[in-house]
Image (cartoon, rainbow, N blue to C red):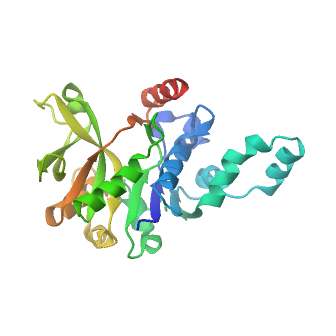
Amino acid sequence: MVTKAVIAVAGFGSRFFPVAKTLNKCMLPILNKPVVQYAVEDCLSAGITEIAIVTAPGQAGSQVRHYFSPDPDTEAYFRNRGWADKWEPAARLQDLADFTFIEQPRDSRYGTAVPAMVARDFIGRDDFLLLAGDDLLLRTDGGSDLADLITRREQAGTPAALAAATVDGKQAHRYGVLSTRDRDATTHILGGMLEKPQDWQKPTCYINISRYLLPGEFVTYLDQLKPNPITGEYQTTDVVEAYAADREMLVSPTTGSYYDCGNINGWLAANNAAAQI
């Protein structure tokens, strides 16, 4: 049973500067909820009860910690004014999961793999979800793509899995594309990752959206990870490829529409889409 999730929100949000100097990009609203709340709610729908949110240190991460922590003064004010219905959507999150906040230090290590590194004690030996807090999957059927990810991995019998959005092949040059091999007609196993391929020939492609279901043994691969020789970053994709070379990793196509809310165009598109639901 999978009960743990690690959500990474420690980035600078440079594409949203100057507002990101004060407002963490994962707290940008999709309608009246911060984008990270959608990730948390997807975790809850998948049965997750322990959530570690890896934040920037100090003031930069305080907004996220405050949002998912009890606030008795504000709660009392809302209830006294008869606004309990407005308060409940925030309050219920704290009742449904135990939140742990881990500060990611501003040291020489940088990259998408660092949140999982600093959450090692939280992960322990347990299976866990790893996802970015500024990515969004919108579904109109009430389902959960993270719940689907967990169910499909169990059905496939693989130790790990990752979610994949499907996009037009003409857009492959914009994304990290997943190559797969088919165990059967419905079971796709990760073969490798292609960073923004310029000559993709197929009509569609699976893209990596930074949502993984990983076993506890994955942390030993994090221990062996070296910074990328070109960028100097500790990249999740590098360690995932290393793991997938030794173990089967299921590729699970998503049902929800994917939006990268880490950039302005993706964030605007997500708001427009959410407004239509």
Q: Position of residue 223 (x, y in %)?
A: 30, 72
Q: Position of residue 71 (x, y in %)?
A: 76, 55
Q: Position of residue 97 (x, y in %)?
A: 58, 61
Residue, far right:
80
Q: Residue at x 52, y 58 (%)?
A: 53
Q: Residue at x 15, y 27 (%)?
A: 203
Q: Residue at x 52, y 35 (%)?
A: 17
Is 166 positioned to the left or the right of 74 in the image?
A: left
Is 118 positioned to the left or the right of 183 in the image?
A: right
Q: Quadrant of residue 155?
A: bottom left
Q: Quadrant of residue 84?
A: top right
Residue 145 appears in view: yes
Name the one closer to the observer, 227 or 73: 73
Is 103 positioned to the left or the right of 215 in the image?
A: right
Q: Residue at x 26, y 53 (%)?
A: 237
Name the one closer to the observer, 260 or 159: 159
Name the one closer to the observer, 253 or 186: 186
How many circles with numbers are drawn on the protein? 0
Is 84 positioned to the left or the right of 55 in the image?
A: right
Residue 9 appears in view: no
Q: Quadrant of residue 265?
A: top left
Look at the image and tell me in which quarter the N terminus lies.
bottom left
